[in-house]
Image (tube, rainbow, N blue to C red):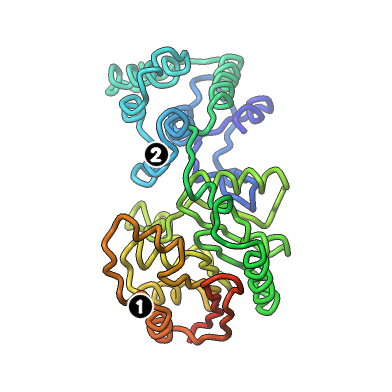
Amino acid sequence: MQKRLLENGFSLKDASAYNVQFIGYRPIFIDTLSFEPYREGPWVAFGQFCKHFLYPLWLMSRCDLRLNRLAQNWLDGIPGDLADVLLPFSKYFSLAYWLYIFLPNRSQKKHSSDRKKMSITLKRKQILQLIDGLMAAIRRLKPKHAKTIWGEYYTFTNYSEESFREKRAIVQRWLERLHPSFVWDCGANNGYFSRLASSKNIPTVAWDFDPVAVEKNYQQAKAQQESYMLPLLCDVTNPSPGIGWANEERTPIEQRGTPDVAMALALIHHLAIGNNLPFYEIARYFARCSPYWIVEFIPKNDSKVQELLLHREDIFDAYTQENFLKDFSAFFSVEERVPIAGSLRTLFLLKRL
C-alpha cells in the first residue's frame, strides 16, 4: 500500500494492523484517512509497521507461531526491544535484523528526548528502497514448522468413512433447514464442516485455537478464493476480550456479529473434560452467542475422550449425556437428535429458549 501511494504522490501516516480487516480470505485496507500528500522526510509510519507486521511475523517464523498472542497485550504493536530479546541468536546473521531492529532501537534510545535527531531525511527513492527491503524480508519469512495433533486431526479421526459421511449429511440437512445468513464453527479445525455453510455463500467464521489448523484452512480458502470463509485463530475457552481504552476500543469477539447458527462439533468433551467446564456454564455461554447450535456429544467411552483421560484422573462423573441434556435444557430446547451410525456419538440441534 505504501509503495503504491508513494508512486502516486501520497504516503501512509499510520500502519496499524487494525487498519486491515478481512472479507472472507481477502485482507482489505480500510483506513483511507491515513493517506496524506507525500512530503520529503522519514516515513512516519515505519516504526508502527515494524511493530504491527514485521516483528510479529518474525517471531512467529523464528520462534513460535503462538507468539502472535503478544499482540493482545501490546495494542500498538510488539516493541522492538522485546522482539530483540525473544529472537534467537541466528538473528545476528541477518541483515534485516540490523536494519529493522538493532539500528532503530539504538536510535530511539540515543535520541529519545530529541525528535529532530531521530528524524532521518529520506528522499522518495530511498523510501521506496526501504519498502522493497521490508517486502523482501517479509517474503522470506515462513511459518515455523509445527505439527500438532489438531493440524492433522482429520488424518487420524476415529470415524469410519460411513460415519463421517453421515455426520456431514446431518449437518448439511440442518443448515439447509435453518437457512442461516451467518454461521460460526467453533473448534473448526481445517474448516471441513465450515465449508458446508461457506460453499452455499453463507458468511462463515471458522474458529480454532490451533495455528497450524487455521493456517491450513486459510491457505485452502485463499487458493480456492473462498469469499465466504474466514478462518480465525481463537480459543473458545479464552476468546478475544474487549481490549484498549476502557476495554471498549476493540470489542469482545461475541459482540462483533451474532450468528444465526453456531456449530460445536467434537468440541464439548474438550470444554468439559479438557478445561473442567461444567455443562451449565458451557450452555450459558453458547446461549449468549447464537440462537441455534449444532452440537456433537461424544461419550466417555469414545476413544477420543479416553485419550483426554489417559494422563489424568477421571473425576468427571457428571460427564454423561443425561447431565448434558439436563444442564443445556435451562437454555435450549432439543429440536432434533440423531445418533451417528457406526459411532458412539450423537448430534443435537438446539434452539435457544
Q: Of discs 2 and 1, which sits in the foreground?
A: 1
Instruction: Determine which residue is flagged by label 2.
Output: 67
Say if 168 sits above or below 99 in the image.
below
| Res 49 visible | no
Q: Residue at x 67, y 44 (%)?
A: 222
What is the x, y in percent for residue 147?
49, 40
Tell me the CA gap for discs 2 and 1: 32 Å
Would you say 79 lies left or right of 216 here? left
| Type of amino acid under label 2 | Leu
Q: Residue at the location (41% across, 79% down)?
A: 324
Query: Which quadrant holds residue 47?
Result: top left
Packing grade of label 1 (10 A; few <14, some 14-19, many >=20) is some
Percent position of residue 57, x then y: 48, 33
Q: Is the N terminus in the top left, top right, bottom left or bottom right quadrant?
A: top right
Residue 8 position in % (x across, y down): 68, 28
Front residue of this view, candidates 41 and 136: 136
Label 2, residues with CA under 10 Å away: few <14, some 14-19, many ≥20: some
Q: Position of residue 219 (x, y in %)?
A: 63, 43
The answer to whether residue 85 is above or below residue 90 is below
Residue under the image location 67 percent in, 57 percent down: 228
- Which quadrant of the structure image shows residue 93? top left
